[in-house]
């Protein structure tokens, strides 16, 4: 009977250890920082078309410490299951001049960003669906601010990732 007791005690100890580790991962990933794979043309040339792995910190936006020029991870206003990476162009109260569709017209429009909202745009205005299409974005949709990048040039066989050149990783410069 004491053998079962020691096995049960060891199992309980190991289960507690795993639970603590998973709790730590949850807190780190949701409240401090998390890795995110970003790809697509909307942020060219700042981010690569084929993908960058970015570290996103989740502290600054909670204290309203993001502003124009910062690249942020935002829950898409059009599809809440997706995240988009865009640059903040304006904060609440800012007057924004923008081209609604630069491929069709060069007529500028002006909008005042309402309270509790931000204006976001991709760096590649010809290939970006952003505030020019769906208007100001509620500040509550901001999920984090980008602060570190790892440029990934190839995924070859299973789980091997080559990072080259060394200049492709480091702190995120706007």
Image (cartoon, grey):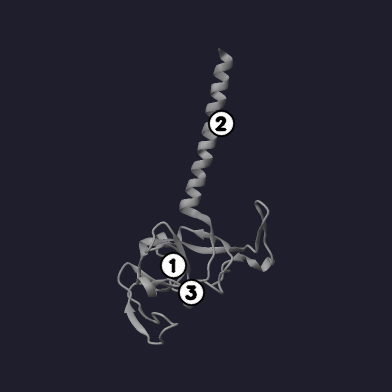
- Sequence order check, earlier mark of 1 and 3: 1
Bin the neighbour count of mark 2 within 10 Å (Cα to Cα): few under 14, some 14-19, many 20 and up.
Answer: few
| Quadrant of the snapshot with the N terminus | top right
* Residue under the image location 54 percent in, 18 percent down: 5
**Sequence order check: which comes first, mark 2 or mark 1?**
2
Residue count near mark 1 (Cα–Cα under 10 Å), binned few <14, some 14–19, many ≥20: some
Q: Residue at x 32, y 79 (%)?
A: 111
In the rendered structure, find residue 66 and report the number of the disc placed on it. 1
* Total labels drawn: 3
Q: Nearer the viewer, mark 1 or mark 3?
A: 3
Q: Up-down: is 154 above or below 128?
A: above
User: What's the distance in space between the residues labelled 2 and 3, CA to CA?
Assistant: 50 Å
Image coordinates for residue 25, horizontal then vertical, percent: 52, 46
| Mark nearer the N terminus (2 vs 3) | 2
Label 2 close to label 3 by CB (< 8 Å)? no
| Label 3 CA crowd tier, 10 Å (few <14, some 14–19, many 20+) | some
- Pointer 1 and pointer 3: residues touching (CB < 8 Å)? no
Residue depicted at x 53% and y 71%: 41
Relative depth, front residue between 45 and 11: 45
Decide which of 106, 88 is in the foreground and name it.
106
Image coordinates for residue 75, horizontal then vertical, percent:
41, 61
Q: Which residue is the extreme one toward the bottom? A: 106
Picture coordinates of residue 88, whole percent (x, y)? 43, 71
Q: Which residue is mark 2?
A: 14
Marks 2 and 1, how far apart at CA: 41 Å
Question: Which residue position is annotated with label 3?
Answer: 127
């Amino acid at each position: 009977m004491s053998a079962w007791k020691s096995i049960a005690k060891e199992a309980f100890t190991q289960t507690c250890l795993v639970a603590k580790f998973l709790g730590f991962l949850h807190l780190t990933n949701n409240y401090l920082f998390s890795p995110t794979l970003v790809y697509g043309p909307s942020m060219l040339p700042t981010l690569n078309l084929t993908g960058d792995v970015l570290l996103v910190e989740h502290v600054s936006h909670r204290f309203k410490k993001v502003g124009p020029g910062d690249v942020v991870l935002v829950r898409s206003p059009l599809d809440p299951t997706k995240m988009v990476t865009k640059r903040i162009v304006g904060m609440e109260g800012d007057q924004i001049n923008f081209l609604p569709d630069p491929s069709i017209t060069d007529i500028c429009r002006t909008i005042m960003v309402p309270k509790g909202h931000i204006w976001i745009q991709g760096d590649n205005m010809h290939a970006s669906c952003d505030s020019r299409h769906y208007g100001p974005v509620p500040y509550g949709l901001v999920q984090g601010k980008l602060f570190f990048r790892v440029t990934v040039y190839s995924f070859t066989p299973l789980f091997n990732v080559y990072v080259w050149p060394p200049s492709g990783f480091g702190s995120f410069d706007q």
